[in-house]
Image (tube, rainbow, N blue to C red):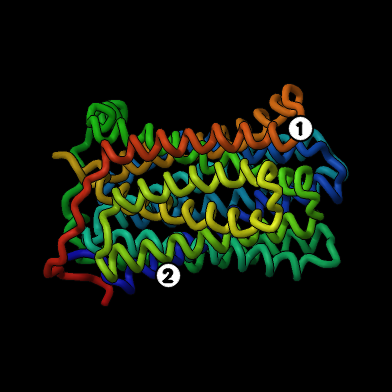
Amino acid sequence: MTLGWISIARLGLVQMALGAIVVLTTSTLNRLMVVELALPAVLPGLLVALHYGIQITRPKWGFLSDTGGRRTRWIIGGMAVLGLGAMGAALGVVLFETHIAAALALSILSYALIGLGVGASGTSLLALLASATAPHRRAAAATITWLMMIAGIALTAGGVGAMLDPYSPALLLRIVAMVCLGALAMTALAVFGIEKGLTISERPAQATRFVDGLKDVWADTDARLFTIFVLLSMTAYFMQELILEPYAGLVFGLTPGQSTSLSGAQNGGVFLGMLTVGIAATGLRIGSLRAWVVAGCLGSAASLCLIAALPALDSASALLPAVVLLGYCNGMFAVAAIGAMMALAGQGTERREGTRMGLWGAAQALAAGFGGLLGAASVDVTRRLATSDATAFGAVFIAEALLFVLAASMAARVIEARRAPVQPTVVAGE
């Protein structure tokens, strides 16, 4: 038996809960530390980087869920740890007003818990999807779960923003507690009984040491090459995250509100790109996952080259459609890559879905932290060397495009080109 559409949507609720809690720490608490408390911007930046760095433990969590037989307990347990970390982070923000040393210690511990919670819950969730989703449903499953995560981020950011005004420490703690408890309750309800009857739950991986399990996965050429693909593509994906809005302001003179709207339009493009792949690859069976990944990477590279060339073309009006196109291609490659990841995770003689997903999740987390830092640092360097801001930013965008081209080449080597066959499948949850 494999997951039906209802069960896939239920697991998407877990992704929504993850996004809802994480956005509090990366957005709301970040703003409060920098604006209301007038703390150095580097402080929340380092704390967020810590939570990404801690996610290098993802392979371990995946291995534990492989050997434990049931993954739902790791999903729920990880969400509980994530919620505890978010509450501690919110309390740390409040403490910064009076006890800086204690607040800093609590914040470091809390962001470490956030990284552990995301790693345990998120990796086990993806491993369950990878091992229990029929091949012809993987692209749609990836689309559903990621769009629901984006929805969770958007709804929480908007809702908390409205509820938190006027700001007070007590109100902050109440809101964060509500979000965390709601996310935990939704997760528990979403995964309750979902593994019952699934074939994969009856065949846990052979119990070995974690190091041995990781070596087994790394010895797989496809798994190793796919890890490199994740590092390249996600580094390119996140390089523009911290520099696109400054580029719009410095080179094209956009106001803060206009540049924020530009980022919103880019995210809208990501949404449409993900939706396109989900419908085309699963519903219409157009193209293989490899073709969508390669097209998305090459399209992202072309979009970045276009964005870099706009100042020379004196075409400021084309910035918005170029950024939307970049988001669209980013969404295409991201959701197709997740579908391919699900397919690759189940390969091999041992049941190592969790370990493989953990390895790729750790690569993604490291690339997310490193990519943003690399993009920002590269702009700082090129602005000192170049004759204009347009040239400096353009050089970084071109370098990012080259990374996408390399990622496309890697994807063409490692991802199967076959379309998933439509075959009779016994489903659970419908």
Residue at the image point whose x is 20% and y is 62% from the top: 198
For residue 189, which numbered disc appears in the image? 2
Left or right: residue 184 compared with residue 350: right
Query: From the viewer's perspective, is residue 128 above or below residue 222?
Result: below
Mark before the other along the chain sequence, 2 or 1: 2
Q: Quadrant of the N terminus?
A: bottom left
Q: Is residue 275 left or right of residue 65?
A: right
Residue 63 in sight in this render: no
60 sits to left or right of 386? left
Q: Residue at x 78, y 43 (%)?
A: 250
In front here: 202 or 4?
A: 4
In this picture, residue 107 sits left or right of residue 98: left
Q: Which residue is mark 1?
A: 388
Q: What secondary structure is found at the residue carrying circle 1?
A: loop
> Mark 2 falls on what kind of element?
helix
The answer to whether one can see residue 423 in this image is yes
Identified by mark 2, the residue type is Leu
Against 400, residue 323 (above or below) is: below
Residue type marked 1: Ser
Q: CA distance from mark 2 to mark 1?
A: 55 Å
